[in-house]
Amino acid sequence: MKFNTAMQFAYGVPDIMAEGVARLVAPNAGPLTFKGTNTYLVGDRSLAVIDPGPADAAHLAAILAAAAGRPITHIFSTHAHRDHVDGIAALAAATGARTYAYRRSEIPHGGAGDAEAEYVGHGFTPNVHLKHGDMVAGEDWTLAALHTPGHAPDHLCLALKERGVVFSGDHVMAWNTSVVAPPEGRMSDYLRSLELLLERDERLLLPGHGGPIEESRRTVKAYLLHRKWREQAILDAVRKGTNTVRTLLPVIYRDLDESVVGAATLSLRAHIDHLAERGLIACADSSNVDCVAVPL
């Protein structure tokens, strides 16, 4: 499928994404973060900040400058990956704002993700736990929490009720598909979370990385179809005897950039897990790159 990698911005300069919504791009570009983490300022009088991004003094100064004297009263995180939450402590200290996110301690037993991963902000615990359907209101905005696990077990999308906007974090992006990396990510959860967005009426998605998505339902449907095609390709390859993660990788991901081989390997494992959960293949340990997948 084709991705939209066009993105007009300048670091440190806020861009208006919708009425009452401004975006700042953090200077942490990379193979998995694209141009950097998107930080959103929501509101006209008092502000909510969504995903303050990395711990970066220049980015913190840009957030405070973009507030232009308006108080920042709420800080939200879509999920506790470090490129989204490392900047929260400094912003909270500078503003006195309370923090809101899905607490990892509230994730059901056995589904709390990777307890060892360095890219997870294990030290971040929000002041307020948001569960699916919770609403938080400011002076002139209301955000509804949508629990959308898959990329991460604590992932939230945030729907801005007054504007027909969903802040989609790393769940849906225009520049690439989300990485679903076991045990932090789970493909069955990710697909169900995509289907959840199809039930929504909002037309504009503002992601954690990359540009806005103006045809939300069309994009989500395309990503669901993309995942189904990928799983069918994996199943076909396994049936023909290409049946380890190591040998499947170049077959499923052609012309793969070296910088994202690790992420592609993990997503491949997630697809194999999902096929096994549905009884289509058997694989004793998909975390092993030499795991042998057997069609059933």
Image: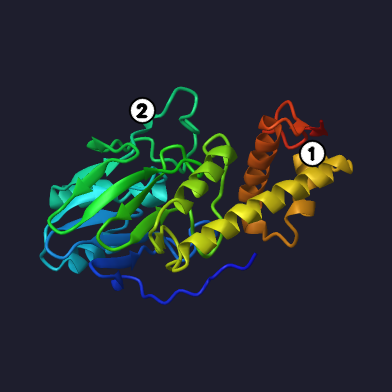
* Coloration mode: rainbow
Residue 254 visible from this viewpoint: yes
| Total numbered circles | 2
First-in-chain label (1 vs 2):
2
Q: Quick one: quadrant of the C terminus?
A: top right
Residue 199 drawn at (x, y percent) = 44, 50
Q: Secondary structure at mark 2?
A: helix
Residue under the point 35% across and 55% down = 53
Where residue 157 is drawn, which disc sits there? none
Question: What residue does disc 2 label?
Answer: 105
Left or right, residue 50 beside residue 180: left
Q: Residue at coordinates 79% horizontally, 39% vertically from top-left?
A: 244
> Residue 226, position in %: x, y?
64, 56
Helix, strand or loop at label 1? It is loop
Q: Quadrant of the N terminus?
A: bottom right
Figure quadrant of residue 20 = bottom left
Look at the picture and state if 39 lies above or below 266.
Answer: below
Label 2 sits on what residue type?
A: Ser
Q: Which one is in front, 218 or 184?
A: 218
Give neighbour class at mark 1: few <14, some 14-19, many 20+ (Cα, 10 Å): many
| Apparent side of residue 236 relative to residue 86 in the rendered image (left or right) | right
The amino acid type found where label 1 is placed reads: Thr
Provide the residue designation for mark 1.
244
Please name whichever residue, 58 or 217, is drawn nearer the observer in this view of the structure: 217
Q: Is residue 236 above or below residue 280?
A: below
Q: Nearer the viewer, residue 175 or 54?
A: 175
- Of all residues shown, which one is farthest toward the right? 240
How far from the left and from the top, in percent, is residue 279? Answer: 72, 30
Residue 247, located in which quarter of the rendered image?
top right
